[in-house]
Image (cartoon, grey):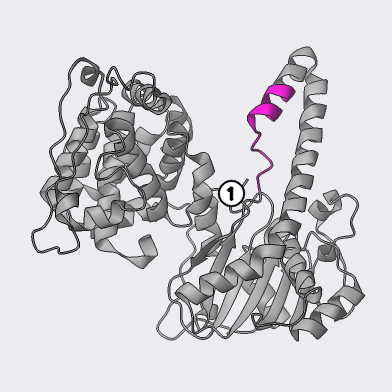
Amino acid sequence: MSHTFKFLSLPHRSGEVANVFIHGYSAGHDMEDRCALRKHIPSALHNCINIFAFWPSGHWSQFDSMSSSGVSAIARVSVLGGAAAAVIDRAVHFNSSRNRATAMGKTLLSQLESYLLEFHPYVSKVNLVGHSLGGRVVVSALLDMVDKPANHDLDIGDVLLMGAATELSGDQARAIRKRTNCKLLNAYSGDDDILRLNVGESSAGRRPIANCKNVRMESFGHTDYWPRLEQVLRQSGFHGYQSGLPAGLQPQPVIKNPDPVVTDHFLYDLLELTSDRIRSQVAKLLRSSSWTTLETDNPLYLLTKEFQLLGGHCLVNLARGRGLKYVQVLLMLAEHYDLVDELHDCAQVIEMEALLISSFFRSSFGEAHALASRKDIAKQMSTMTDKSYFEQVDSLAASLTITSYFSTPEAPAPAYRSNESAVTSESKGLAVASTSVLPSLTGLFATTRIKAAVTNLKSAVKPGYSALIPAVAVLFYARLKLNNEGLL
């Protein structure tokens, strides 16, 4: 498993101080949860640069193939035995994540320093905020500093531990403060029963710690810290927090029963802000599926709703009264293309789309296609004409139908804007592989091409996939062109 952090700077960044937020176990594990965590950062921190440090913390519900098969085998013999095996497996999984958090902490500051040097070289101080096992990451990082001689370290300001799933002694806290000159804040709650499961340790998140500023959070459960982050920051006196909203901003009204269509901001807002031509392209692709009932091109609400319904199973949709949100559709497609392990490198929706779209074109057309490289796909798309890109998407859609298995249509060569000097003659003349899903005789025994052929066959057979996949490619193009930081 990866031991690298994926850093994400949130919009509206300014200042010379960076607040770095680190999540715990069963958090930040997929794009939907990462988007949810980002929304909890209060606007009152607008005078600082706010950065999320995502790490592979694992999730209690995610069983690997070995664990899943083992528990299933025991459950076939005894239901109670299977339940006990599942509990034991999850305990082992948490312990593994706990050990990983300690190891990740030892690399946090060096990785963060490299990120700041590249993207925020003017930052002079960092504040650290860690929740649950994220607090363990922070403590591990600071204790690692204690054990090393002073060098050109990052200047540490405030350190806020929230429900920290780690032990921290008063002597360790004193050593950290002496070494870093930081202000150590411990937000804890005696009502945090989840931390009782941190077997073998007396967690700092349940008790006051000597040599810290201890902040008792009344009636706080373990999962209350992120939704009530603003309260924690206010009570702890965290640096950079300012009560109230920045000038010109109004508080958002609380909607008790939000419309799942309108609140799907990564889809609904994108379609609202993009052009009629792009909305028409999305509508055309959705209508190619027999599972949609879309009759007109540009009804924003209906277009969003049909996309969501196409992403979910029809019977499940009927039961819950809605389809899948856009990010959930992307997760579904990532599993379809066996890209789950690569998702850790994606902290924004547009990064996840780039991963998916490059996989779409590579699976259908091979490595030679101009859009098959995730690294270069944004550059290729930015220099490609709109007409040419839509032709590529149409070819992609054609390659995901059953009829494509009985013909060998060819994708048109990409056409680039003539005034784009960044595109070399070599890239303009890049050959595009045949769109035939059936591999050639010489490539028949290539594992990757066989796997791609099987994936494309599943895309053609599964309801809605042959329309969803090219529609996502168009939406990625719209997001790239729009370049709205709040929708990335």
Q: Is residue 447 above or below residue 222?
A: above
On screen, residue 237 versus residue 8, left or right, reads right
Relative depth, front residue between 204 and 354:
354
Q: Residues within 10 Å of mark 1 (few under 14, many from 20)?
A: many
Q: Is residue 414 above or below residue 205?
A: above
On screen, residue 326 versus residue 80, left or right, reads left
Q: Is residue 68 magenta?
A: yes
On screen, residue 94 versus residue 227, left or right, reads right
Seen at 81% across and 64% down, the residue is 205
Provide residue 92's location: percent of width, then percent of height. 79, 40
Seen at 31% across and 23% down, the residue is 460
The range drawn in magenta is: 58-71
Residue 146 seen in render: yes
| Residue type marked 1 | His
Residue projecting furthest to the left: 418
Provide residue 286's location: percent of width, then percent of height. 24, 35
Q: Is residue 250 magenta?
A: no
On screen, residue 36 versus residue 139, left or right, reads left
| Residue behind mark 1 | 29
| Element type at mark 1 | loop
Provide residue 103's location: percent of width, then percent of height. 73, 57
Relative depth, front residue between 356 and 72:
356
Q: Quadrant of the C terminus?
A: bottom left
Quarter residue 311 falls in: top left
Residue 262 seen in render: no
Q: Is residue 145 above or below residue 302?
A: below
